[in-house]
Amino acid sequence: MKIKELKRTVNTSWSPAGHYPSMIVTGSAAQQVDANFSSNSYLELYALNLGDSSPDLELKSSIQTQHKFQKLVWSGSGVIVGGCDGGLLEFYSADNLLNKENEPLVGSTSKHNGNVSALDINPYQKNLLASGASDSEIFIWDLNNTSQPMAPGNRSQPYDHVQGLAWNQQVQHILGSTFATRCLVWDLRKNEPIM
């Protein structure tokens, strides 16, 4: 049963558990053409608004951005992270997006070599972000200090594009990664894959 819909070419992420009202952040999808053939890029916040019988989401905020997004995640600490082309990560304040009083873009970094298309927030330490890109490149970031990411171990061979990342929901230092032909499970305490 369809409750709501959004007719846009975007990547999305839900607001964190416990955030009220429930919201969705959307970012214009990288390497995609939208229905209007527009090259503009936007980051937008929508309220789910289940009390309204309309199929439309309620737009709460919209800003134009310089880059389109491969992936979005919304951390429990209120930071929205966008993975972009060219190794770029952008950090936005959800509060600044909603309040429209301060600049929403609070930081960016380009430590990755290729498109950043895999992101996940640690469910236990909400300031820890895992990011993945080309050439088997995976970094772990502290959202409180994004200047020095760490790698979970040596890059896996053969080099491949990281397609997905997921923190273990029961053991906080275990991270899963997927590639085109394989999966690796990393133990951050050992700094190496264990599977």
Image (tube, rainbow, N blue to C red):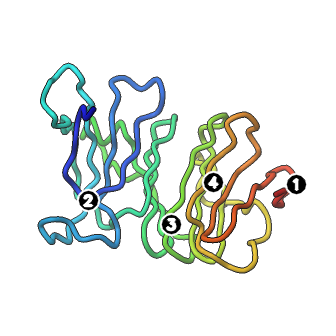
* Residue 116 marker: 3
Q: Are marks 3 and 2 in contact (CB under 8 Å)?
A: no
Type of amino acid at the residue the image marks with label 4 = Trp
Farthest residue, direction top: 51
Classify mark 1: residues with Cα within 10 Å, few (<14), some (14-19) or many (20+).
few
Residue 191, placed above or below residue 22: below
Residue 142, placed above or below residue 55: below
Q: Are marks 1 and 4 in contact (CB under 8 Å)?
A: no
* Residue 60 placement (x, y as % from top left): 21, 37
Q: Give the residue pinned by disc 4.
A: 141
Classify mark 4: residues with Cα within 10 Å, few (<14), some (14-19) or many (20+).
some
- How far apart marks 1 and 4 lie (CA) works out to 17 Å
Chain-order first, disc 1 or disc 2: 2
Type of amino acid at the residue the image marks with label 2 = Thr
Type of amino acid at the residue the image marks with label 1 = Lys
* Residue 37 marker: none
Quadrant housing the C terminus: bottom right
* Residue 9 marker: 2
Q: Give the residue pinned by disc 1.
A: 190
Q: Secondary structure at mark 4?
A: strand
Type of amino acid at the residue the image marks with label 3 = Val
Q: Nearer the viewer, residue 153 or 168?
A: 168
* Residue 158 placement (x, y as % from top left): 72, 80
